[in-house]
C-alpha cells in the first residue's frame, strides 16, 4: 500500500519544502539589492501568475498519476509517453541542488554552535570569521556538511508519514513561533516603520527589467518548482485532497513568511544603522555582528534565528531527496533504506568536492572557466536545470497531457472557467516567460 499524507500533513510538507533559505536568507537580501517595495510587488505578482499556476500543475500531475515522478508523467501522457516521461527526470536537479544546499545547512548549523558562545563584535570581524571558515577550515565544513546530510537521510529513511510528515508537523510550527517572536520583538524598534515602508512603498524607478526577471526566478525557486518535489508530495495524497486549494495556501504562506522575515530583518538592520543592500552576506556576516549589540540577549536572538534557518532548510532538504528515492523504490524495487543510503552518500561525496572548491588549498583544482565547482553547481541548477524543468512541465501540461483527463480531475476542485484560464496560461504564457528568464540568466 502506497504511503500517504494526511490533508494537514500534505500542506505542511509542501509548505516546508517551499519555505526555506529562499525566504529567510535570499529574499531579504535581494529585496535590499533591488530597492524594496517595487521588487516585493513584482515578486508577489510572479508568485500569483506564474508560481501558483505551475505549482497547481505539478501537484495535479502527482495527485492524478499517483506514481513516482517518471511514472506520473508517463501515465498522464496522451501519446509518446516514452518521450514525456523523461520530464520526470527533473528530479535529478534536486540532487544537484542538495549537494551544495547541504553545505549551506552545514554553515547554518556551525553558526548555531557559534551563537552559543561569543558573537563577532563588528561586520569586519564577522566577515573574517565566515571567510576563514570557508577558505581554511575544511574539517569543520566537512563535519557540519556530514551532520546536515545525516539528518536529511535519516528523516527520509523514516518514510512519508513517520519521517517527512512528522518532521514538518513538529518543525514548521516551531519555525513559525520563532519567526513571529522575532517579528513582534522588532516591532519595539523605532526602525520598524522604516522597514515596513521599505517593504511596501514601491519606487518604480528601481524596477528594472533585471529586477523583474530576478523576481520571477526567485518565485520559481522558492516554490520548489522544476524538480518534481511538489509532484512527488502530491502523489502521496488521497483522492479527496484539494491540491488546487493546497497550492494556493502554500504559496500565500510562502509569500507571508518572506514578507514577515523581510520586515523583521530590515527593522533589525535599520535600528543599528546597517544598510539595506547587504547582499548574500546578510545572514552570515551582518546578522551575527548585529546581534552582538544586544549583549547576552543577542546570543539568544542569534540562536533562535539560526534554529529558524536550520528548520526551514532541513524541511526543504528532505523534500529534495524524496523524489529520487520514490523513483528508485518504484522503478528499481530498491528498499527505502538502500535508496536513501545510496543517493545520500552520492550527494554527500559530491558535496565534499564542492566545499573544497571554496577553500584556499583546493580552489585552483576545482575551478573551471573562472568559476569554482560550488558556483558552477549553483549556477547550472538555478539558471538552467530548474527553469528547464518548469518549461517542460508547462509544455507537458499544455501539449503532452490529455486535456480532457486533466479537466475531468481538476474540475472537482475548480470551475470550468478557472480550469480554462489556468490551462491557457500554463500552455501559452508561462513557457515564453521562463525561456526569457533562462536566456537572461545564461547571458548575465
Image (tube, rainbow, N blue to C red):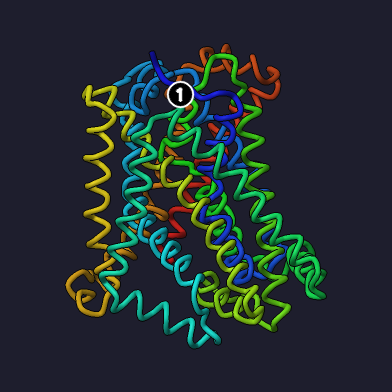
- Residue 203 shows in this picture: no
Q: Which percent across, then down, holds residue 76?
A: 42, 18
Is 72 left, or right, of 275 in this rendering?
Answer: left
Looking at the picture, tell me which residue is in the foreground, 382 or 292: 292
The answer to whether residue 101 is left or right of residue 179 is left
Nearest the eye: 5 or 251: 5
In this image, 421 relative to 122: left or right?
right
Could you tell whether 423 is left or right of 267 in the image? Answer: left
The image shows residue 118, relative to residue 13, as above or below, that is: below
At 79% from the left edge and 69% from the top edge, which residue is drawn?
A: 192
Q: Nearer the viewer, residue 118 or 69?
A: 118
Q: Position of residue 441 (x, y in %)?
A: 44, 60
Q: Quadrant of residue 41?
A: bottom right
Residue at (54, 42) in percent of width and height: 16
Choose top left, top right, bottom left or bottom right for residue 135: bottom left
Q: Residue furthest left?
A: 365
Q: Which residue occupies 57% across, 39% down? A: 429
Quadrant where the N terminus is found in the figure: top left
Q: Residue 437, image x and y in percent?
A: 49, 53
Q: Which residue matches tag 1? A: 235
**Whether residue 199 is visible:** yes
Quarter residue 204 falls in: bottom right
Quadrant where the C terminus lies? bottom left
Q: Where 171 sits versus 67, above or below? A: below
Helix or strand or loop: what does disc 1 sit on?
loop
Amino acid at each position: 500500500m502506497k504511503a500517504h499524507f494526511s490533508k494537514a500533513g500534505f500542506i505542511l510538507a509542501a509548505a516546508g519544502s517551499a519555505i526555506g533559505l529562499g525566504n529567510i536568507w535570499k529574499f531579504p537580501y535581494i529585496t535590499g539589492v533591488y530597492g524594496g517595495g517595487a521588487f516585493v510587488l513584482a515578486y508577489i505578482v510572479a508568485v500569483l501568475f506564474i508560481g501558483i499556476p505551475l505549482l497547481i500543475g505539478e501537484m495535479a500531475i502527482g495527485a492524478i498519476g499517483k506514481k513516482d515522478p517518471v511514472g506520473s508523467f508517463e501515465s498522464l501522457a496522451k501519446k509518446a509517453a516514452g518521450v514525456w516521461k523523461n520530464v520526470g527526470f527533473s528530479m535529478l536537479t534536486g540532487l544537484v541542488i542538495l549537494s551544495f544546499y547541504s553545505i549551506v545547512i552545514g554553515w547554518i548549523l556551525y553558526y548555531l554552535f557559534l551563537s552559543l558562545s561569543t558573537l563577532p563584535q563588528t561586520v569586519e570581524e564577522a566577515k573574517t570569521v565566515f571567510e576563514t571558515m570557508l577558505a581554511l577550515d575544511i574539517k569543520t565544513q566537512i563535519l557540519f556538511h556530514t551532520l546536515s546530510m545525516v539528518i536529511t537521510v535519516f528523516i527520509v529513511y523514516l518514510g512519508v508519514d513517520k519521517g517527512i510528515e512528522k518532521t514538518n508537523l513538529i518543525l514548521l510550527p516551531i519555525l513559525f513561533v520563532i519567526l513571529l517572536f522575532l517579528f513582534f520583538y522588532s516591532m519595539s524598534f523605532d526602525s520598524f516603520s522604516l522597514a515596513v515602508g521599505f517593504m511596501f512603498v514601491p519606487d518604480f524607478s528601481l524596477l528594472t527589467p533585471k529586477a523583474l526577471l530576478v523576481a520571477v526566478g526567485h518565485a520559481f525557486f522558492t516554490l520548489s518548482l522544476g524538480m518534481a518535489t511538489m509532484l512527488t508530495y502530491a502523489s502521496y495524497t488521497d483522492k479527496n485532497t484539494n491540491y488546487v486549494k493546497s497550492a494556493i495556501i502554500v504559496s500565500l504562506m510562502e509569500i507571508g513568511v518572506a514578507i514577515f522575515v523581510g520586515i523583521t530583518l530590515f527593522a533589525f538592520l535599520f535600528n543599528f544603522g546597517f544598510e539595506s543592500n547587504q547582499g548574500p552576506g546578510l545572514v552570515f556576516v551582518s546578522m551575527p555582528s548585529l546581534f552582538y549589540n544586544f549583549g547576552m540577549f543577542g546570543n539568544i536572538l542569534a540562536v533562535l534565528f539560526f534554529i529558524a534557518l536550520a528548520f526551514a532548510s532541513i524541511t526543504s532538504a528532505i523534500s529534495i531527496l524524496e523524489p529520487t528515492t520514490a523513483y528508485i523504490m518504484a522503478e528499481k524495487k530498491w528498499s527505502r533504506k538502500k535508496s536513501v543510503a545510496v543517493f545520500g552518500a552520492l550527494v554527500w561525496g559530491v558535496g565534499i568536492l564542492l566545499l573544497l572548491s571554496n577553500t584556499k588549498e583546493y580552489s585552483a583544482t576545482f575551478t573551471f572557466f573562472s568559476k569554482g565547482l560550488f558556483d558552477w553547481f549553483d549556477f547550472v541548477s538555478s539558471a538552467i536545470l530548474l527553469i528547464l524543468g518548469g518549461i517542460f512541465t508547462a509544455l507537458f501540461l499544455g501539449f503532452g497531457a490529455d486535456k480532457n483527463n486533466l479537466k475531468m480531475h481538476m474540475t472537482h476542485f475548480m470551475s470550468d472557467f478557472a480550469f480554462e484560464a489556468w490551462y491557457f496560461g500554463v500552455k501559452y504564457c508561462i513557457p515564453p516567460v521562463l525561456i526569457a528568464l533562462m536566456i537572461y540568466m545564461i547571458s548575465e
